[in-house]
Amino acid sequence: MKVTLRKITKTPLDFELKSNEITFKGYLEYHTGKLILLKANLSGILIKDCDICAEEFKLSVDEDVEFFICDGIYEDDSDIELDVVEVLNDIVDMDELLNSELELIKSDYHSCENCIKSN
């Protein structure tokens, strides 16, 4: 799903994407300047390899996601740190954002029930 950033206004634009057993649901809303706010929830089941025994297991996911999308290079003179994704062509690929969030979750340390019980 691709969204043109210049069409996003103060009225939230709802979205919902599914990838296997994961749902990415939330909204996009104009914030200020070139910034668009993304607020969403990732929920469902993600297949992951255990970081201890390397066996595949189902990881329950329920994560709130919030960051800004900038139409172009983000520049700010203030000392406030923001989580910003830069988009250079006025179009944000929501499937790509979903995949990035899933990869972030996968990169964390997770172990299966068997390994948790044995420790």
Image (cartoon, rainbow, N blue to C red):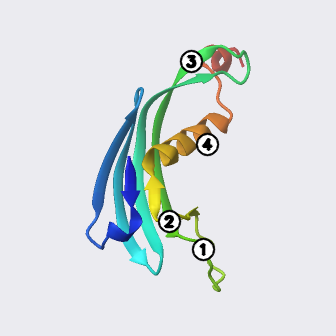
- Mark 4 vs mark 1: which is more N-terminal? 1
Q: Amino acid at mark 2?
A: Phe
Q: Amino acid at mark 1?
A: Tyr
Quarter of the C terminus within the rendering: top right
Secondary structure under tag 1 reads loop
Task: Locate residue 23, reporting x and y percent.
Answer: 38, 37
Task: Locate residue 87, reporting x and y percent.
Answer: 54, 62
Mark 4 against mark 3, which lies toward the viewer? 4
Could you tell me if the residues under marks 1 and 2 are in contact, i.e. CB atoms within 8 Å? yes
Mark 4 against mark 1, which lies toward the viewer? 1
Could you tell me if the residues under marks 4 and 2 are in contact, i.e. CB atoms within 8 Å? no
Could you tell me if the residues under marks 4 and 3 are in contact, i.e. CB atoms within 8 Å? no
- Mark 3 vs mark 1: which is more N-terminal? 3
Please give the residue where the numbered disc 2 appears in the rendered image. Answer: 68
Q: Residues within 10 Å of mark 3 (few under 14, many from 20)?
A: some
CA distance separating discs 3 and 1:
38 Å
Query: Residue drawn at (46%, 81%), measured in percent from left and top?
Result: 33
CA distance separating discs 4 and 2:
17 Å
Q: Residues within 10 Å of mark 2 (few under 14, many from 20)?
A: many
Task: Locate residue 5, reporting x and y percent.
Answer: 40, 65
Res. 74 mark: 1
Query: Residue drawn at (54%, 38%), measured in percent from left and top?
Result: 102
Left or right of residue 11, residue 29 in this image: right
Res. 18 mark: none
Q: Amino acid at mark 3?
A: Phe
* Viewer-closest of 28 and 117: 28
Res. 104 mark: 4
- Mark 4 vs mark 2: which is more N-terminal? 2
In this view, 79 is above or below 14: below
Please give the residue where the numbered disc 3 appears in the rendered image. Answer: 57
CA distance separating discs 3 and 2:
32 Å
